[in-house]
Amino acid sequence: MPLLNYTTEVSAERSVAEIQSKLAKAGAWSILHEYQRGTGELIGLSFQIDTQFGPMAFRLPANIDAVAKILIKHRTRQRYAKDGDRQKAARVAWRILKDWIEAQLALIETEQVKMEQVFFAFVQDSKGRTLYEAYEEKKFAGLLMPGDRKVVHMEEAQC
């Protein structure tokens, strides 16, 4: 299956602007851009929004390095980046994030879920860490299932 949006020519900046617009329409009253130190590459957006419990902050990362690796890995099989082009990876990463946010906001708009529910892993604590990062530090203590369970990776699974 091809990587979502791998053929996009939409600039990362346009995708980010579309994300900002969608978040603002959903009620975000503060949106912050996060750039990679040294390179100036846009790697994430943070936003603040009022929830039923009060104002909350969320941070949404764009993992451009991960997308670049996938594009390089698949370039011999598909029409991906010719040489791991960083701009191509940024375009794809931000477009995927835009589509995901759009889908989450549609779920919220139709009252199937709440803002806090779909963006829960990305909520920031008082130290600026996302909930995911805080639990990852603790190796997900308190969330793991009891017993000795073997993790089966997709490539190992018999379908």
Image (tube, grey):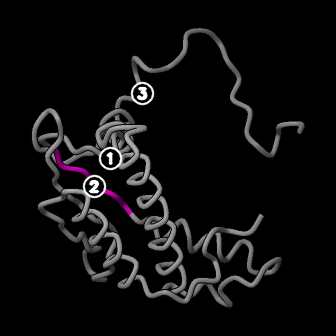
Tell me if label 2 and label 3 are in contact, CB under 8 Å. no
Residue 159 sits above or below residue 76 on the image: above
Q: Residue at x 89, y 36 (%)?
A: 158
Across and down, in percent, residue 97 comes to: 45, 64
Asked if residue 58 is among those painted magenta in the image, a careful observer would answer: yes
Q: Amino acid at mark 2?
A: Arg
Which is nearer the N-term, disc 2 or disc 3?
2
Q: Which residues are magenta?
A: 56-61
Asked if residue 152 is among those painted magenta in the image, a careful observer would answer: no
Residue bearing the label numbered 2: 59
**Badge 2: how crowded within 10 Å, few (<14), some, or many (20+)?**
many
Which is nearer the N-term, disc 1 or disc 2?
2
| Quarter of the rendering occupied by the N terminus | bottom right
Residue bearing the label numbered 1: 122
Across and down, in percent, residue 118 comes to: 39, 42
Q: Is residue 110 left or right of residue 70?
A: left
